[in-house]
Image (cartoon, rainbow, N blue to C red):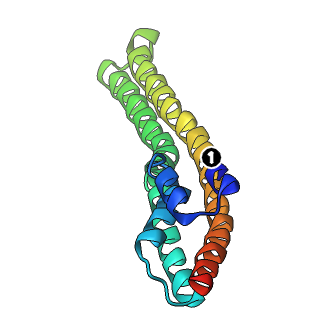
Amino acid sequence: MTAFQSTRDPKKLFAASKTQILSPISNVFRAVYNDSPHQNREEVRRALKRYEALESAKLESYLGFLATTGSTTPFIGLFGTVWGIMNSFRGIGATGAASLAVVAPGIAEALIATAMGLAAAIPAVIAYNYYMSKTRRMIIEMEDFSEEILDLFTRETHEG
């Protein structure tokens, strides 16, 4: 964006974009630049949409893991809780008495399983929300900048 604000020369922008290989905006610009020559505005628009979609998919590619972790680990913890309580009941059944010594190991397992499930889920949900918000902002910036790229390349085509 800084390079674009300082110059509208596609060759200089292309050179500047090579230093920003992780930037989705730079990646879209380079891809469209390499698709030259563009014959008309609609062709450039189609190319921009295609490259925007590819960059959006890259940005969102690992968010599924965070979403899955955040939504499933509480259930895994719950399963461990049930397992620990079942062990407590087995201990009661085996000894015929409900003393603390019999029940404590199963309850400890249950609490540890619950804590582990929450320890994985809470950071995953926080990270998912954080990165999803950043991804949405980057996609909006990329779409806005694509309009600038469209104007730049179609102006260049009409002038050149």
Where does residue 110 sit, x and y in percent of width and height?
45, 27
- Which residue is rendered at x = 48% and y = 76% of the image? 50
Residue 93 picture quarter: top left
Q: Residue at x 62, y 76 (%)?
A: 150
Describe residue 96's horizontal placement relative to residue 6 as left or right: left
Q: Secondary structure at mark 1?
A: helix
x and y percentages locating residue 92 in the rendered image: 38, 23
Q: Amino acid at mark 1?
A: Asn
Measured from the top left, where is residue 69 in percent x and y?
A: 46, 45
Position of 6 compared to 128: left or right?
right
Q: What residue appears at the point 43 percent right and 49 percent down from the top-left corner?
A: 65
Asked if residue 97 can be seen in this view, the reply is: no
**Residue 45: x percent and y percent?**
57, 82
The reply, left or right, for residue 143 in relation to residue 94 is right
- Which sits in the foreground, 96 or 148? 148
Which of these two is toward me, 124 or 134? 134
Q: Quadrant of residue 146?
A: bottom right
Q: Residue furthest top?
A: 101
Say if 9 sits above or below 111 in the image: below
Q: Quadrant of residue 148?
A: bottom right
Residue occupying the point 49% across, 79% down:
47
Q: In the rendered image, which residue does mark 1 sit on?
A: 129
Q: Nearer the viewer, residue 116 or 4?
A: 4
Q: Is residue 129 above or below residue 102?
A: below
**Quarter of the image with the C terminus in it:** bottom right
Question: From this viewpoint, which residue is outermost toward the left?
Answer: 94
Residue 146 seen:
yes
- Residue 44's place in the image compared with 139, above or below, is below
